[in-house]
Amino acid sequence: MHQAALTLDPAFRVAPVQRRTFGTFVEHLGRCVYTGIYEPGHPTADEDGFRADVLELTRELGVSTVRYPGGNFVSGYRWEDGVGPKELRPRRLDLAWHSTETNEVGVDEFVRWCRKAGVEPMMAVNLGTRGIEAALDLLEYCNHPSGTALSDRRIAGGAKEPHDVRMWCLGNEMDGPWQTGHKTAAEYGRLAAETARAMRMIDPKLELVACGSSSSSMPTFGAWEAEVLTHTYDVVDYISCHAYYEEKDGDLGSFLACATDMEFFIRSVAATADHVGAKLKSRKRIDISFDEWNVWYLSRFQNADPPSDWPVAPRLLEDHYHLADAVAVGGLLITLLRHSDRVRAASLAQLVNVIAPIMTEPGGRAWKQTTFHPFAQASRYASGDVLRVEPVCPSYETAAYGQVPLLHAVATHDERSTTVFAINRATDRPMELRIDARALGGARVVEASTLSAPDVYARNTADDPGRVAPRPNPDVRHDPETVVLPPVSWNVIRLG
């Protein structure tokens, strides 16, 4: 059995837990919207056509914010197509995902869904095929109370009160050649800066996100952030990061350590932002919105044959996750929490069907993928302050990242309890974790759960949705507090 130890001390405070860490993402891609959150005629559909089973699972997942409407989709989106009477809305070709967009769901429907789900809407504007004017029009439509053509158009459509969207993304992945309207860093930086300045003329208190790199492996990574922030530093609040991970060539050890790359990504972007701030002699700090992240088997999508037609809501990117995927997601959540001093918002991409924790069948059931559980538990139990923990544990060699610790962990603490979130990356044996809780005044382990399975590639299905789910961990001892973590597992340990 591997041996590990960590110390908990409320003095080791990183930052408050950021509720926006537990955001997700809804894009007009595949079945995320249509037969995902929206399906009139479904047995659970409400008066607006929203699936009540998906709404219930979204609440259980603990989602705080939802980014919309993309993603690559937004770079060709005309927001006006999705407002007004549904029977008059045009059908359009979506170049991003080679699909037909019906526009049955648009801005007003999305915000209405957010209110029902109890989540905060986060909107992206099109800086690919459009620009400043369209962004201003959308902002006025969403947030101005009344008395103008656009705000009155919203009211006429049934939304009397402003949508009051506070957080806005200035485009999406504009560094990517796959993006409609792809730009150089200088071209995008100038456009983003001018769009931000104009939007702030309407509402100076908006929170604005500039596009950072689509991946830390992009050839322009680092230089892109430096150039973009040189243009936008004084008019934005966040720079974005996007990252996806998958197991490659059967290298499970590297995959379970993918949070190592996310750590590098966050540190590098923060350092670049601070460097630009120093050059500009600014006292302002740019934070990070990690507004796309997940396990995504991108190689499967890239190797698939492109569609020959333009289908409506086709089955795209419907990865079916196993236990190891869930443990990797847990590790990424731990990393986001560990950097709560700088990562102040994040979005798991996506919410339903498309590389998602929730799956549905048209007209049928909705169920939880394995990745649902670490997200839901972290959202439920992370509260108060994030505590830095530095585990003492063995390491192992990975092909992708070199030597990596077998234990990856973080803790949160409030006046009622302390929670440790931990993954055991070991594939060969359990790990005995000893917790030094003396600084917590005699706190003891009151509850421990583990997400594990004999088969690391076990999946949940509609017929067996509970095959991989958190279960009580019976291997808990006291004096000192000790918990045995199964191999390849996500673990939640609560002390009180």
Image (cartoon, rainbow, N blue to C red):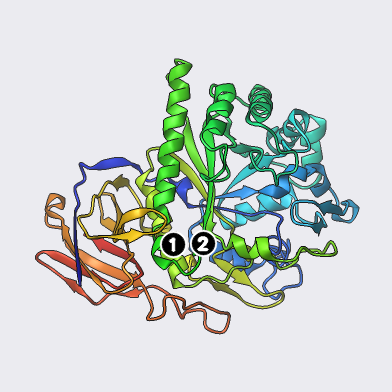
Amino acid at pointer 1: Phe
> Looking at the picture, does residue 141 appear above or below residue 359?
above
Task: In this rendered view, identify the residue nearer to me: 407 or 216.
Answer: 216
Tell me the element at label 2.
Answer: loop
Task: Residue at 51% x, 41% y: name it.
Answer: 289
> Looking at the picture, does residue 486 appear above or below residue 232?
below
Labels 2 and 1: the sequence-earlier one:
2
> Looking at the picture, does residue 448 appear above or below residue 218?
below
| Residue at the farthest left position | 479
Q: Which mark is residue 411?
A: none
User: Mark 1 packing: few (<14 Cα in 10 Å), some, or many (20+)?
Assistant: many
Q: Is residue 490 left or right of residue 286?
A: left
Task: Residue at 63% x, 63% y: name it.
Answer: 354
Q: Quadrant of the N terminus?
A: bottom left
> Looking at the picture, does residue 281 appear above or below residue 8?
above
One can see residue 69 in this view? no
Amino acid at pointer 2: Glu
Tell me the element at label 1.
Answer: helix
Q: Which mark is residue 246?
A: 2
x, y percent for residue 436: 14, 56
| Residue at the farthest right position | 88
User: Mark 2 packing: few (<14 Cα in 10 Å), some, or many (20+)?
Assistant: some
Q: Quadrant of the C terminus?
A: bottom left
Q: Is residue 446 left or right of residue 456?
A: left
Do the residues bearing badges 2 and 1 touch, measured as CB atoms within 8 Å?
yes
Q: Which mark is residue 255?
A: 1
x, y percent for residue 180: 75, 43
Q: Is residue 335 left or right of residue 52?
A: left
Task: In this rendered view, identify the residue nearer to me: 209 or 228.
Answer: 228
